Amino acid sequence: MAVGTAPLAVSDEALLQQAVAGDRDSLDELFLRYRLVAYRVAHRLLGNEADALDAVQDAFVKALVHLPSFQGRSSFKTWMLRVVSNAALDLGRQRGRREILSMDAMGPTYREECEPLIHPEPTRELEREDLRRKLHEALAQLPPAQRQTFVLHAEAELSYREVAETLGISIGTVMSRLYYARQRLRVLLEPWIKPHE
Amino acid sequence: MNNAPDSPWTPDPQLLAAFFDGELEGRGDLADLRARLEGWLEAHPQAADEGTKHQQLHKLWLETAPAEPSAATWTQTLDRIDAKRQQPITIPASKRPWLTVGIVAASIALFVGLLFGALRSMLPTAVKNDPLVVAPKVRPAAEPEVFPVATADEVTIRLIEGADIGTLVVGELPVSGPLELAAPGEVFVFHATGADVHQQGSRPPMIWARLETD
């Protein structure tokens, strides 16, 4: 009778090497590890699922094709987040004139595809979606560098040091960008920021 | 009275935000700074409002987390990634600076060529088509020769024979019209006054101007 052993955790770097060599299982594992955080960062920067998925796809393809640019000086996670956030900003610029798509505009197909992490009441979900749209509109008013910094910190939960490493900037710059981003967001979102209940 | 908590020190707002973000937690090297900030916040309760606003924005952020795509959507995305990475890389023109430089250089060369052609076509026909001096056919000049030119007063025409009836020695400067060198034996100097006649061997150089006949 075979005794199951816990699989050894393969490093991101090893998975990446194997994925580049054509190993689909390694690609699956790498994708599974980072798809959600990459998607959420991209979604915050772009405001809709379709564009966010495009950015995630671009980022993973770049990671596989341009492996030499990942020289191991940073973790794969921070490297991937830099690539995906840059891809999202590029995509956002390319589609700058496109209207921000609301859930209603995307129609029932989009709604069916979305599987909320929590299944709230319909009214609550509408309220949440409205908030999401307001937040995205407020984020869109920030300068791209501030927006990228804030999203990496708030959504990917990177520390100041990790954000600095990801973007290749100083911690002081991270502090400054986060501070001014928050100040601006507070003003723009004041009607929707609820006091503690 | 000397231990009053109202110290002149006021934390930088960005440092305060870092404190609210938990950036000073678990940092032994920043323990003193953290303690100082905590002391300052106790002494300035109104500053706690800043922390509250910080948390409210964070709460709003969490409440609006994007919904995760379906499993099927993830699979489709992964399949597209797998397919795309196997495609040959095509570099867009904007990422190929050498191509851009080449195109610009070719455009400039084409423009200069067209400009040169246009200017050339604007020149007078006589200047454009006819050489000012026809070089001797049998004697490639190693270096340009300077020819002495006789004026009308210095030359007396004594005889013009046969086929040379259509030619005439230049009378006045500047010389105009198509020119050609006389062949050996075509020119004979009978008498020269007030001018040096240069004659080397049996081939004296002489410029002739073709007579305008119509």
Image (cartoon, coloured by chain):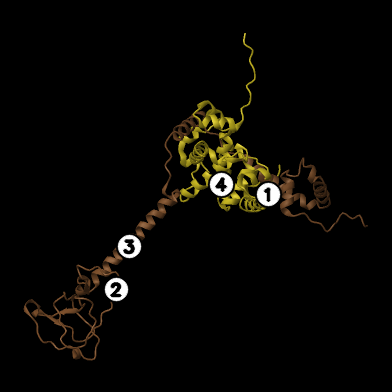
* Amino acid found under the numbered disc labelled 3: Phe
- Look at the picture and state if A24 lies above or below B60: above
Q: Considering depth in this image, is A58 or B1 the residue closer to the camera?
A: A58
- Look at the picture and state if A3 lies above or below A46: above
| Chain with brown colouring | B
Q: Considering depth in this image, is A36 or B94 the residue closer to the camera?
A: B94
- For label 3, count other residues whose C-alpha is less than 10 Å away and answer few (under 14), some (14-19) or many (20+): few
Instruction: State the separation of the CA atoms marked 3 and 4.
Output: 50 Å
- Look at the picture and state if B112 lies above or below B163: above
**Which image quarter holds the N terminus of chain A?**
top right
Please state the horizontal and vertical placement of residue A143, each as a whole percent of the image: 57, 53
Instruction: State the separation of the CA atoms marked 3 and 1.
Output: 51 Å
Number of the front mark, 3 or 4: 3
N-terminal of the two: label 2 or label 3?
A: 3
User: Mark 2 falls on what kind of element?
Assistant: loop
Please state the horizontal and vertical placement of residue B123, each as a whole percent of the image: 24, 73
Instruction: State the separation of the CA atoms marked 4 and 1.
Output: 25 Å
| Chain with yellow colouring | A
Query: Residue at image x 30%, y 71%?
Result: B143
Task: Give the chain letter at badge 3.
Answer: B
Instruction: State the separation of the CA atoms marked 2 and 1.
Output: 75 Å
Q: Residue furthest front?
A: B201
Residue holding disc 3: B111
**Are the residues under badges 2 and 3 in a single subunit?**
yes
* Amino acid found under the numbered disc labelled 4: His
Residue holding disc 1: A171
Residue A79 image-quadrant placement: top right
- Look at the picture and state if A25 lies above or below B112: above
N-terminal of the two: label 4 or label 1?
A: 4
Mark sitting on residue B144: 2
Please state the horizontal and vertical placement of residue B126, each as a whole percent of the image: 19, 74
